[in-house]
Image (spheres, grey):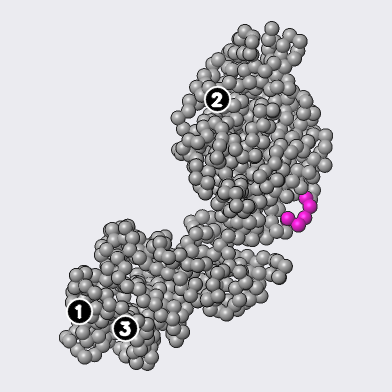
Amino acid sequence: MPTPIAIARDLPSPCGLRHSACVHAVLVALMLAGVAPQASPAAGKPGHSGFSDHDPKREVRILGRVAPTDAPAIPKATSNGDWSVAGGRLVPRFAPSPKEQMWFPKGDAAHLGEGLVRARIELHGPLDVSLLLRQRYQGDPPTVLSGYGLSIEGESARLHRWDRGMPLPMGPEVRLGKLDQRSSLELVVFMVGPQLIASIYDGDGLQLIATLAIHDTTYSFGCVGLRVGPKHDPNSAVTLLTTMDATKHATRVHAVPRSPRYGPATDPEATPFGNTRYAFIAGAATARLPKDLRARVQSTVDGREGARAVLFLDTVGFERLRRTGVDVLSVDSNVPWSTFNPDFRRRAKKQPSRAGRGFVLEDSYKDPALVEQLLRAYHERYPGITELVEVGRTHQGRALWALRISDASRTDDEPAVLLDAAHHGSELLSVEYVLDAIDTLVAGYHHDARVTRWIDNLEIWCMPMVNPDGNHMFIHESRFAIRKNGKDSDGDGYSDPFEGVDLNRNYPFGWGQTGSSGLPMHKWYRGPAAGSEPETRAMMALADRERFAAAISFHTFGTEIYSSYVVGDTSDMEPNVSRAVAREIVAAADVQPNGRKYAVRSPDYPVAGSDQDWHTHAHGTMAFVLEGSHHNPPLDVRTQAVIATRPVWMALLDRVLGGPWIGGHVRDAAGKPVAATVMVAEVVTGAGERWGTRARDGRFDRAVAKPGRYTLVVQAPGRAPIERTVAVGRGRVDVDVVLP
Ligand SMILES: [Zn+2]
């Protein structure tokens, strides 16, 4: 029988830290809400813990077994009386005696002031037992007690304090009742500063029987132990004793790489000691913190009021901080990313600085303002090959900026390619891939033959930030703003960090299918209608106008490329040219900084309403989602990642120009562009695709998987369809079709 502790979150919710003048009452409420055990349906089943987020391995076992497979722990102890420890069962073996008997295990785990103590008792007769807490005793064998205890005598329970051997009842007495109908009890005592909260459960079903709480400042630290009195039936054995020291377990740390700059990644939600939040204190006050709390200082933020230190704390940590007497200036669970990024805060104050033929990019991640500054700087430096284009505006009025890179004016008829990023606002590394592409392109023009060829023959549209509202929110407002676009969905005038639309679920193709959600607070919220969002509509309008030959939308961080289609139950083109090209372009890339190469994937979960599927379906664009290797890694990793990813977009530009590829124009006899569909008969499509020509020049671009003979089928309204056979070798073939 394992011995789970049930922790439930469905107790009455606390009023919140900012609310009450009575900080103490609020904290107790928080502690109860965060960690007070309660029966749950899952509790009591072998191998299953009802203690939310609780890993029994985190408890230190002093006596007994936690899991059925554990070897019983048999501790060294100091005791008086006659105790037997066998098979993980602790039994006082004494003839009925007027004297009380005590048992104190030795070792670090038995000494704690703040944290959790858990014990189980098998019931085989009357109880007269105390779970001792924060105790000091005199002598060996131990005699005089000073400290606390949770005592059960007969059918009643209460907390006690002993002062040099004198017991003093604390708090109310609680009747447990029906102990003769139970076979075991589980006792859990939670200790934070002056608060001791004890819960008593049925040991089998884990129903909560009683909760007791006291507030007392006399003893802050001491030993865990057991005491039995003269009425105790010696057959009622203690079968488990564990501790969890709050000062050692105050935050849960993920098994993710430790960032040398920002410390271990921490779970933003919960720890075994309750939900986490950030506490801001005066920077100078950190010197007054105990060592382990000082270790939780995550950052120092310069503000108008001077430097503030930020601690990431759970309930226990927060209470401990409060008891140091250090003023807590504010508490927030919702701080933005910039709070913990000194590089960004430093960089945000400066203009872009030149580096070689480009600009410094590796000194920080970027928010919408920094992206705009940079795009303007590139355009000012390279006006002949760049154009800064506002392709739309967001809900909050931010411009959607594109930097179009080409030697020619926009009326020229070169194939267009799109590199975009940050459909998801929090994916900061994705922005860097596109900025790196811009820098590589402009700096390489007339210095690197490959780059010069691309710029001379393509129009490369670079959009580092498709979702500036979402990005701004993540960087400047809330760490809970993750993917979405910050839209005020409920119209209350405030953009909640959980509101907004996932832009990469909002495109019309496959919209509404599985892999997206209709719930406005869901992270995959697809929006109220297909293409409902201004960002989506701007991207679609741009694509309808430019008819991109190829596109990469950068995301993070699966180290993989998605070919079309990713929506479920849709026929891919056959042969799957998209898959073939995806394979080719990622094969060109280096190993990423996480040690992996980009994998070509059809996702094992469907994604409905993605940009890539829409581009493919609407225009036959060779469109891909490239998931980079990391999520907002330290800057040295950022730079390794962008360098290792360059070969992918470079290979795609080469593929458009270097083939195998069919491009060309459809015009009428007078040389005017014709709006026509141009399909390749050997590429069978099954989702109603009708890929047309570009309005301004009649251009079309169709990738093929490999060299061979292909048949172009060209159809325009009111004209007879015509077919053209094209022999495609290793290169690109341009075909001018004249419709009679
Ligand atoms: Zn993403």
Residue 349 included in the magenta stretch of the image? yes
Q: Position of residue 40 (x, y in %)?
A: 33, 60
Q: Which residue is mark 3?
A: 78
Density class for disc 1 (Cα within 10 Å; few <14, some 14-19, many ≥20) is some
Q: Residue at x 49, y 72 (%)?
A: 26
Q: Which residues are magenta?
A: 347-352
Looking at the image, residue 223 sits to the left or right of residue 730; the answer is left
Between the C-alphas of marks 2 and 1, the distance is: 78 Å
**Who comes first in sequence, dot 2 or dot 1?**
1
Residue at image mark 1: 126
Where residue 337 sits, quadrant-wise, is: bottom right
Residue 577 numbered mark, or none: 2
Residue 235 seen in this snapshot: no
Q: Check if residue 175 falls in the magenta segment.
A: no
Say which residue appears at 43% left-offset and 65% top-offset: 12
Q: CA distance from mark 3 to mark 2?
A: 75 Å
